Image: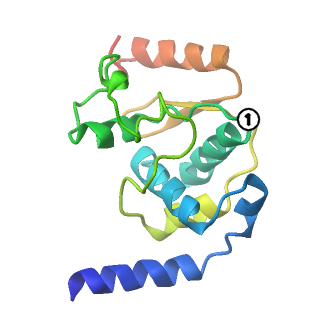
Amino acid sequence: LILQRLADTLAARMQAIDWTGLEPLGLDPYDGLIVASLIEREAKLEEERPIISSVIYNRIEIDQMLEIDATIIYALGRNPGEVTLDDLQVNSPYNTYRNLGLPPTPIAGVRITSLEAAAAPADTSFFYYVLINQDGTHGFSETFEQHQALVEQAKADGVLTP
């Protein structure tokens, strides 16, 4: 009964959202649900959900690897606390560091705000993000060089492990 209610609620939420914005990318509402699950795992702050969504779609549009740590954690079946270089080698269709495009299924349950962000991403030219504050704030950047500078600053600030 509880699982049926959850499934019905998700179906109703999915139907209430306009997914037509995904069509130019060759994506469908199920793909939108997968993106929403990535957003759900990556974003702590509500206001960042549409921005993280934009990064995902910007990468998809240019066939760039998504490289989302949450997919590695899902593939590992456990949260190592911090994803290591060894973890990035996990042989799994969910490893977005090794496989181009979206993972095959959602990696998490989603709330409505993640679905909305997946259907209506912010209009940005960002391709990268990194956690820059323990409160969940991310820094967003257009280039890899800008991204690396944010990563180094986050390490210096103790947000990321050096």
User: Left or right of 99: which side holds 69?
Assistant: left
Which residue is drawn at the image coordinates 49% and 51% (left, top)? Answer: 39
Colouring method of the image: rainbow
Circle 1: element type: loop
Seen in the picture, residue 120 relative to 137 is either above or below; the reply is below
Task: Give how far across and how far down residue 130 sits, in percent.
Answer: 50, 29
Work out which residue is located at the far bottom of the displayed protein and give it: 1
Seen in the picture, residue 21 relative to 71 is either above or below; the reply is below
Which residue is drawn at the image coordinates 63% and 40% (left, top)? Answer: 55
Which residue is drawn at the image coordinates 24% and 31% (left, top)? Answer: 81
Task: Give how far across and how far down residue 46 sits, in percent.
Answer: 50, 56
Which residue in the protein does label 1 denote?
A: 62
Task: Give how far across and how far down residue 28 sits, in percent.
Answer: 64, 64
Task: Give how far across and how far down residue 54 sits, in percent.
Answer: 66, 46
Mark 1 is on which residue type?
A: Ile
- Quarter placement of the C terminus: top left
Q: Is residue 101 visible?
A: yes
Seen in the picture, residue 22 relative to 125 is either above or below; the reply is below
Q: Residues within 10 Å of mark 1 (few under 14, many from 20)?
A: few
